């Protein structure tokens, strides 16, 4: 219904404002309105599997919009119809945009319901103990995915461990179908680290045939997602193809250009605010306005990161004395109530205003608007080979860590998010992160 309304509003506006309403224009308008939900259906934009998460839903709506523009243009030209150009040039892009806005609003509503335990699917997780616990923990953290773990089926040697941790019914690998029927589940999720030989999965899929229960298989590539994964048949044998991440090319050039343009524009527009914040820092406590700190950037190159000073001048020398109060479980130093933070600094940190001078780093090319958190040299010295992949791209002013909890995240979770960004970077993902950053800053969660 929302998609139909999105089609009626812009096309109706063209019809009402056109100086000469002709029969071909009326019929063309009606056909555009009726064709829109059909094209959405043909593009699989109504597939419930894409609702609530990922970018596939929006990509399919965009594809339907392109098809509608092409079809409208081709038909009007071939049939020599006297159709208003505004219908093609304005109305169709507008209805596509309205549909995307409506879908985004629907997604926000769906995620709100899922956060409250509604509109979810009941899931049985299958596999070895450690893999089952990891997948169950991830599904519980990311509740917006809409999957609620209600039971597990594991190998015999891990049943007690999984039962103690999850506090849910636990069965064996041969009990999946019976447990799924008894608990009225919607989905069975099989982990990659289980007895997932071809024969086991084949028998399980046969057992679930006709039940309406969805079978999901975790590929074991947690940080690789989206466009990089493809199913490729080799002489009838389907194999999962994983494309290599792209760290070069036109996309990176566009990203660098956008970074500099946005950073330069933001510095000009925010100049009065930056001067006011600099004055507040200067009047609040003795010391320089800007805090300069050496950080590690792309490919291990070091640079000086700029921030508004939010702590006392000798803050770095007090770290050792405060180690007992460190709440971090990794390489970072974190305190919820840090005595080194000044009065103005506490306010700056809550709204992330202390990070605005990093726009100068973005303008200079040492940082990007979106990317992993810029690490300290002492952190990088303790990186293993997997964590070092964070250095394959420029560090960012914001990133997945910023919109997912900031300082409230564990070290493992922060690293996982940074690696996910590195492996799956795209311009669309950058735009989504920037949009969500404003909400994260206003909510002030994890800012201390």
Image (cartoon, rainbow, N blue to C red):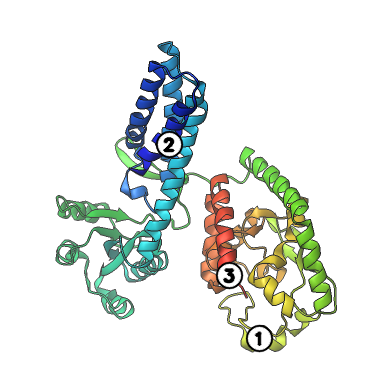
Rendered residue at 76%/61% (across/down): 273
* Residue 303 visible, this angle: no
Q: Position of residue 422 (x, y in %)?
A: 57, 54
Rendered residue at 56%/64% (across/down): 440
Q: Residues within 10 Å of mark 2 (few under 14, many from 20)?
A: some
- For the residue labelled by badge 3, is the local secondary structure a helix, a strand or a loop? loop
Tag 2 residue? 9
- For the residue labelled by badge 2, is the local secondary structure a helix, a strand or a loop? helix
Q: Are marks 1 and 2 in contact (CB under 8 Å)?
A: no
Q: Are marks 3 and 1 in contact (CB under 8 Å)?
A: no
Q: Nearer the viewer, residue 197 or 446?
A: 446
Tag 3 residue? 444
Q: Are marks 3 and 2 in contact (CB under 8 Å)?
A: no
Q: On the rendered image, what quadrant is the N terminus found in?
A: top left
Of the residues under marks 3 and 1, which one precedes in the sequence? 1
Q: Nearer the viewer, mark 1 or mark 2?
A: 2
Residue 323, labelled with which disc? 1
Of the residues under marks 3 and 2, which one precedes in the sequence? 2
Q: Nearer the viewer, residue 307 or 256?
A: 307
Q: On the rendered image, what quadrant is the C terminus found in?
A: bottom right
Q: Nearer the viewer, mark 3 or mark 2?
A: 2
Work out whether 409 lies above or below 436.
below
Q: Nearer the viewer, residue 61 or 29?
A: 29
Q: Position of residue 367 (x, y in %)?
A: 71, 55
Work out whether 255 lies above or below 132.
above
Q: Position of residue 125 (x, y in %)?
A: 29, 64
- For the residue labelled by badge 1, is the local secondary structure a helix, a strand or a loop? helix
């Amino acid at each position: 219904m929302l998609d139909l309304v999105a089609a009626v509003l812009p096309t109706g506006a063209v019809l009402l404002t056109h100086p000469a309403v002709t029969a071909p224009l009326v019929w063309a308008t009606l056909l555009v309105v009726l064709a829109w939900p059909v094209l959405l259906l043909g593009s699989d934009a109504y597939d419930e599997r894409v609702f609530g998460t990922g970018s596939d839903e929006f990509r399919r709506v965009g594809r339907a919009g392109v098809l509608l523009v092409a079809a409208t243009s081709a038909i009007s030209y071939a049939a020599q119809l006297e159709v208003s150009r505004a219908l093609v040039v304005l109305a169709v892009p507008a209805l596509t945009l309205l549909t995307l806005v409506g879908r985004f609003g629907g997604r926000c509503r769906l995620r709100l319901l899922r956060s409250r335990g509604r509109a979810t699917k009941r899931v049985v997780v299958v596999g070895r103990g450690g893999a089952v616990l990891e997948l169950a923990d991830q599904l519980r953290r990311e509740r917006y995915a809409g999957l609620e773990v209600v039971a597990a089926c594991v190998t015999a040697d891990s049943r007690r461990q999984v039962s103690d941790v999850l506090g849910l019914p636990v069965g064996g690998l041969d009990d999946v179908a019976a447990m799924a029927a008894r608990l009225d589940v919607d989905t069975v999720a099989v982990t990659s680290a289980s007895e997932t030989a071809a024969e086991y999965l084949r028998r399980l899929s046969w057992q679930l045939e006709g039940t309406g229960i969805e079978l999901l298989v975790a590929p074991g590539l947690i940080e690789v997602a989206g466009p990089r994964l493809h199913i490729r048949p080799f002489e009838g044998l389907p194999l999962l193809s994983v494309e290599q991440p792209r760290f070069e090319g036109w996309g990176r050039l566009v990203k660098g250009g956008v970074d500099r343009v946005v950073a330069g524009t933001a510095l000009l527009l925010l100049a009065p605010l930056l001067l006011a914040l600099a004055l507040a820092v200067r009047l609040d406590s003795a010391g320089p306005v800007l805090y300069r700190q050496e950080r590690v950037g792309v490919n291990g190159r070091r640079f000086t990161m700029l921030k508004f000073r939010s702590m006392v001048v000798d803050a770095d020398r007090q770290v050792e004395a405060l180690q007992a109060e460190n709440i971090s479980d990794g390489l970072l130093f974190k305190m919820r109530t840090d005595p080194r933070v000044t009065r103005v600094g506490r306010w700056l940190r809550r709204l992330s205003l202390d990070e605005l001078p990093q726009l100068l780093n973005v303008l200079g090319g040492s940082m990007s608007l979106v990317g992993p958190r810029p690490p300290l040299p002492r952190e990088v010295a303790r990186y293993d080979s997997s964590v070092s992949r964070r250095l394959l791209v420029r560090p960012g002013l914001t990133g997945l860590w910023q919109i997912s909890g900031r300082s409230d995240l564990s070290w493992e979770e922060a690293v996982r998010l940074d690696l996910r960004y590195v492996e799956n970077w795209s311009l669309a993902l950058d735009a989504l992160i920037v949009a969500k950053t404003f909400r994260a800053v206003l909510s002030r969660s994890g800012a201390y």
